[in-house]
Image: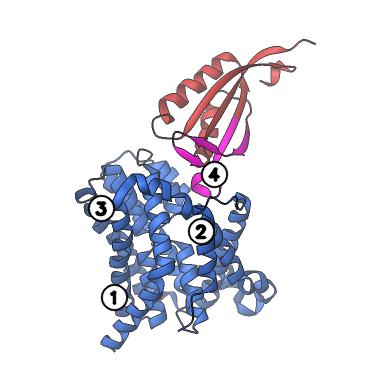
Amino acid sequence: MLPIDPIVLFFILGLAAGLARSDLRLPGAVYEFLSVILLLAIGLKGGVELAQQSLVALLPQMIAVVLMGLALPLVAYPLLRGIGRLARADAASIAAHYGSVSIGTYAVAVAWLIAREVTFEEYLPLLLVLLEMPAIVVGIMLARGVSADTDWKSLAHEVLLGKSIVLLVGGLLIGWAAGPVALEPVSGLFFGLFHGVLALFLLEMGLVAAGQVTSLRRHGLFLVVFGVVFPLFGALVGAVLGWLLGLSPGGTMLLATLAASASYIAVPAAMRMALPEANPALSLTASLGITFPFNILVGIPLYHQLAGLLHRLGG
Amino acid sequence: MHADARKLVTIVTEAALERRLVEDLKRLGAHGYTISDARGEGSRGVRSAGWEASSNIRVEVICDEATAEAIAGHLKAIYYANYAMILYLSDVGVLRPQKF
């Protein structure tokens, strides 16, 4: 086993600096730039690999992943309502966050696998894109009911043309169309610098996560417990699904990580528009203040062991 | 120098609202607007602009009094309850009244 990853140490640095109220602060534009590179890099990698696959053969995986994205918020919602005693809109919004995925967490998991030379299905970004959206629809329906007067048209615009989907799908298409050889000239930026960009991104995420701590104190124990326990449940679902779908141990671990992660880009933006009465501090405190650090620091190695265990048991 | 009296409407709110807000402003009769990124702290916590969900914008519109009242009334009714938003009006003088 390798010692703790340097990129994780960057996250801890950001967290520590934020908690100690250092004046360290990356400008918003830098954060934007870093996330653009990460999203495109993940998309491009996936697209190159996707060109080698037949989409028809991937169809069962695609359908299974969408079903998982629909199911996870349906499990989370009654817990949030019943045990957490949260208001309907708040519970639905948090459920949507946890049914969707965090691209930052996925990137860290990929870096973790690369550092250990574990192979995985490189087309997984396709599944990542598919997992972003279903939970948003379920979340809105949980809050509003089916016959709601939700403006689905402008919401679809908000989600489908949101930054993360546009860059991921765009990267997939460019990678798919260009292929590995033609991508060579741009690979220095997107692949060569991937780990460095991720390290800076995590530094900023550490600062952002530290900023959630004050609201953590206000919102109490339930969110902390939920932010740790629900990802563990999600990881179990994702790992079993990955194993059933015949993914490699590395791919199984990535699907577990996706299921365990909670969105903090696409879903907050969609919820702000569709469910304005839901308190964004609650969902962001849980997803950024608890679940993101938990997955980065503890979850990812754990999910790798879980995937290995399933593959050893199931053969 | 003569300057015509107009109202300056300044809105500080969540960046997530930008597109909707711009549509509202145009529909309510604003001839133009200026948007800048902003950060600060208020009753809804620190808006540090470090990343998407904590970004703020400041929207400035110069218009006649009736339009300013329409904008203020509409935003108050639609957004005040659920969004981080403040809005204030000030008197300004403009040199080319036909623009506003």
- Count of numbered tags: 4
Q: Which chain carries label 4?
A: B
- Structural crowding at the residue carrying mark 1, measured as other residues with C-alpha within 10 Å and reported as few (<14), some (14–19) or many (≥20): many
Residue on which the image places disc 3: A77
Against A4, is A95 above or below? above
- In the image shown, does A174 or A306 lie closer to the viewer? A306
Residue on which the image places disc 4: B48
Q: Mark 1 lies on which chain?
A: A
Q: Are tags 2 and 3 found on a single chain?
A: yes
Task: Give the residue type that dot 4 points to.
Answer: Ser
Whether residue A96 sits left or right of residue A268 in the image: it is left
Residue A240 is marked as 1
Circles 4 and 1 in contact, beta carbons < 8 Å = no
Q: Which chain carries label 3?
A: A
What stretch of residues is rendered in magenta?
A: B35-59
Q: Distance between the residues labelled 2 and 3?
A: 32 Å
Circles 3 and 1 in contact, beta carbons < 8 Å = no
- Structural crowding at the residue carrying mark 2, measured as other residues with C-alpha within 10 Å and reported as few (<14), some (14–19) or many (≥20): some
Q: Are tags 4 and 2 found on a single chain?
A: no
Q: How far apart are marks 4 and 2 (CA)?
A: 18 Å
Judging from the image, what is the letter of the chain drawn in red?
A: B
Q: Nearer the viewer, mark 2 or mark 1?
A: 2
Residue on which the image places disc 2: A16
Residue A172 shows in this picture: no
Task: Give the residue type that dot 1 points to.
Answer: Val
Q: Distance between the residues labelled 3 and 1?
A: 22 Å
